[in-house]
Image (cartoon, rainbow, N blue to C red):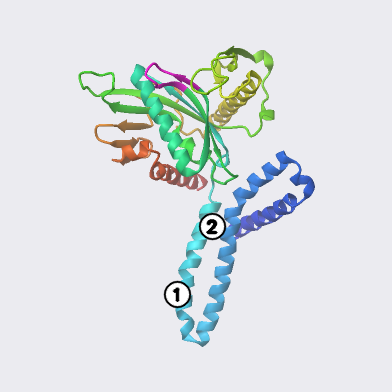
Amino acid sequence: MSNQVSLVDDIVSEYQGIEMQMADPDVAGDQKQFRKLSKRYAELRPIVAVNDELVQARQDLADAKEMAYEDHEFQPEVERLEPLVVELEEKLADLLAPRDEQDSEDIIMEIKAGAGGEEAALFAGDLARMYERFADKAGFQWEVLGLNESDLGGVKDMSISFKSKTPSRDGAWSVFKFEGGVHRVQRVPVTESQGRIQTSAAGVLVYPEPEEVEAVNIDDKDIRVDVYRSSGKGGQGVNTTDSAVRITHLPTGLVVTCQKERSQIQNKARALQVLQARLDQMEREAREAEAGEQRASQVRTMDRSERIRTYNWPENRITDHRIGYKANNLDAVLNGDMHDLIEALQAQERAERLEAEG
């Protein structure tokens, strides 16, 4: 308890310090610094708010007990406040529990069709729409950075950015990080004339996104830049100039594309930002593996046997194999109702972190 009190005191002190900094006109005029402070402020605000409620509830309880000692009519107030104090103590402990330091970050997601040809591409498109609908419902902004479609309108590969609309302790990474891996589908493909159920797969990669393009630190000699004509819907400017950009990182073989911007210069800057995010994630995973802390969270191959989740169309069932989660509401999940699934994954992560802290 004393450690918790000390931690809360430190957080309150930091929070108040940030408030003072943000009120400084010089700081407010520096957008980069102000955005950084706002982000940290948003991370601390829920803790400070619950702590304030707890301090007040404890004081009210002490006063009620004192009055109830003199007058039993105040006993119901004591009985109302005692469970409230316990509830707030548990809520504060949960907020102070070890958490992923990147939970407040925005993310970039890549979706790639795996084994299964056209059917795999159609399924990859279903996944993309599922994430976009979930983002809409959960209050995240999303933007397609690059898209390579199949003949039937499926997704061969696609990159999407997901961002919080305002700085938040629970950013896009806190929910989408669980989606990295191989997703398997079981259904009758639209291309199947005999009505046979087939299995195909799509792979999802998720990684935090650098806040600023200035964060890019990639040597020009390590990349090859190719330009090509943008494709897909987009009105004027699409299919008329070689504005789309493909960057290959020669040391690792990573390839990223961007075609959303109007100009080649803007697309190159955005593609470099995406590449930097990929490289940063690879470096983090290498450090975790070296420290013996690597968790089986993201599968790097498109092999159908290495799956994190199965989507069974005939039985309307979704199964997450990492935590044994099963639900017969696949239609709702594909429509973006992923909250129960995400909450189950978050609960498992919290339990693992608390156990690791010992």
> Picture coordinates of residue 134 (x, y %)?
44, 39
Q: Quadrant of residue 181?
A: top left
Secondary structure of residue under mark 1 = helix
Residue identified by numbered label 2:
92
* Quarter of the figure with the N terminus: bottom right
Residue at (72, 50) in percent of width and height: 22
Residue 216 on the magenta span: no
Q: Is residue 38 above or below residue 210?
A: below
> Picture coordinates of residue 171 (x, y %)?
54, 42
Q: Residue furthest bottom?
A: 70
Near-viewer residue (282 or 111): 111
> Picture coordinates of residue 243 (x, y %)?
60, 17
Give the side of residue 297 with respect to residue 279, left or right: left
Give the side of residue 10 with respect to residue 230, left or right: right
**Identity, as a three-letter code, of the amino acid under mark 2:** Leu
Q: Which residues are magenta?
A: 147-157
**Upstream in the sequence, badge 1 or badge 2?**
1
Instruction: Please tell me how many numbered marks the rendered image carries.
Output: 2
**Identity, as a three-letter code, of the amino acid under mark 1:** Glu
Residue identified by numbered label 1:
79
> Picture coordinates of residue 240 (x, y %)?
57, 14
Q: CA distance from mark 1 to mark 2?
A: 21 Å
Residue at (46, 68) in percent of width and height: 83
Q: Quadrant of residue 27?
A: top right
